[in-house]
Amino acid sequence: MKLLSLLLWSFVIAFASFAADRPNILWLTSEDHGPHMGCYGDTYADTPNVDALAAKGMLFKHAWSCAPVCAAARTTIIAGMYSPSTGGEHMRSMVPMPKGTKMYPQFLREAGYYCTNNSKEDYNLQKPEGVWDVSSGKAHWMNRKEGQPFFAIFNELCSHESQLRKRPHEAIHDPAKVRVPAYHPDTPEVRQDWAQYYDQVTLADASAGERLKELEAAGLAADTIIFYYADHGSGMPRSKRWPCNSGLQVPMVVYFPPNWKHLAPKEYGHGVKSDRLVSFVDLAPTLLSIIGEQPPEWMQGHAFAGKFQTEPQPFIYGFRGRMDERYDCVRSVTDGRFVYLRNYMPHLSQGQHVTYQFETPTTRVWRQLYDAGKLTPEQSIFWKVPKDPEELYDLLSDPDEVHNLAAQREHAATLEKMRAAQENLALKIRDAGMIAEGEMHHRAEGTTPYDMAHDDKLYPLARILKAAGEASSMKPGAMPDLKAGFADKDSAIRYWSAMGILMRGADGVSAAHDEITQAARDSSTYVQVAANWALAQYGSEAERSAALPALVGLANWSQHDVFTAMSALNAIGDIGDKAQPIAAQLKALPAKGESPDGRFNGYVARLLADLTGSKPAFDDAGEPPAKKVEKNKK
């Protein structure tokens, strides 16, 4: 009996010592808002609680979410890996975790932490067992065992995109005093949406204040490290869903109490505004470093605090894949001053018709003014086709990112530096997003996209990246390689050859007529889509008459996988009025079918609704309507 008591007492002492040696960690996160807060110098904002936290702690001036939308951004956080590396870059997709990896809360739980998430998960990666102690609207650090250190997340939904367009609304900010960025038209609707966005940020700040008071009242403030950040840029169009600075820059404020100041970033101090470049891929390794654990080598970020913090990095990175029902492929990078975007699909506009985005009044009035020819050049960039293959912006002189410097001689060296950084990262992380989404799933069958992408036989990335770069460069000199690519054994090379011809319009179809005609019957459905898209848009009347029915067939979900169907419907939508001959056939297409995961299920229906003029439906495959957000808050 004495031996048992001695063992129990030894355990209690050891646990108390362990708990005392590790801080509590609280993450206060919020939806859809950029650094529009007083502590970031925004005089229109009203954010006293986070401002006070920044005054006694510090903030990062250059923090990027990596993705300009929630699911892809959280996927980067939960794995400590870039989502294009894991295959989880596409909005509301689902892929398995890379072999031999864990989600970061599993490491914390193994180290003795009580881990709670209140309450949004929304990962594009399949969640293994044992990630959280509790993940629900009732999750709270106060439910831990006595003396147990905790890691807790509270995610505030009130600043979500859906809430900035909700009417009626009780105003806090005066729309007349809002600053309208150069890319938006100055209309009453735009001013109202921006003012209401600031109102919701104020409410998110108030929620953070309540959580901080709760911590103080429990007497835990002295032993709790606090992070405040948002999940990506503002919910306004040209921020959310677009991987430039306005879509990726987030507030990130951290506070290390005196007891734990030795774990803080090296530059930490009261009111410090750090120039260190940080992003969401850094959060998981930073957490492990704070609790004294060496981050595993497969994590792709860099710890900026704790025992294993690294030196500041020269660049941070962003990406965009499919956003809901619309495809694109964009990669971005910043050094803190310059922002570089590489558009691998320049034939598609920034303002593709993402149904949920068009629920915002700003989006609709902006498009109406563009169609009426009433916008300035800066305001037209969002809708312009084609996009520039490369974009370069100087945030010092052009914080709204509307003056592209990529073609200017004096910035050639900067352009080359940023381009090299983007391509080097793609090769380093084995970017799995350089092929069609469905092709990625097909090649990864029996394994994971991450592991597939690390097998050069399955995924010859250097060759694919070169083919994608040539296709999207829009340079005439790329034509011989594009034509030769149609004979390649790898369907990804053939895909980028077909896309390159499509991007070059009528001139491309004329120059590679035989190749693109043959590609319309390729063994890969994704090559077929691109080739028939080119022929329907830019071919002869006879070629259009053959290509349009071929696209209808590819869009038939009962005959092809969901990814082929989405790709074909995107192509038909881009063809526009030239697709009128197949209007009746589109109405007969199935809006439901089989898919790898239920998160894909709503997208074909939305695309068909847009093409046929029927009413779109929102479900679990897309962003929740406002009433769902309100329900979740309760």
Image: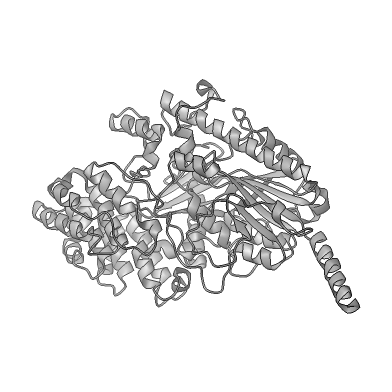
In the image, 254 versus 349, the foreground residue is: 254
Give left or right: position of 249 versus 620.
Answer: right
365 in relation to 233, above or below? above
Task: Give the colouring mode of the picture.
Answer: one colour
- Total residue callouts: 0
In the image, 299 versus 629, the foreground residue is: 629
Residue 610: quadrant of the picture: top left
In the image, 612 versus 546, the foreground residue is: 612
From the top left corner, tell me how far across and down residue 306 is, in percent. 73, 59
Residue 627: quadrant of the picture: top left
Question: In the image, what residue occupies the spot 60% across and 46% down?
Answer: 29
In the image, 369 versus 407, the foreground residue is: 369
* Extreme residue toward the right, this view: 2
Query: Which quarter shows the C terminus?
Result: top right
Query: Which quarter shows the N terminus?
Result: bottom right
Question: In the image, what residue occupies the spot 84% across and 72% down?
Answer: 8
From the top left corner, tell me how far across and down residue 31 is, in percent. 54, 43
From the top left corner, tell me how far across and down residue 392 is, in percent. 47, 46
Give left or right: position of 78 versus 149.
Answer: left
Residue 95: quadrant of the picture: bottom left
469 in relation to 45, above or below? below
* Extreme residue toward the front, this view: 1
In this rendering, does residue 151 appear at all?
yes
* Extreme residue toward the left, this view: 542
In this rendering, does residue 482 appear at all?
no
From the top left corner, tell me how far across and down residue 3 is, in percent. 89, 78
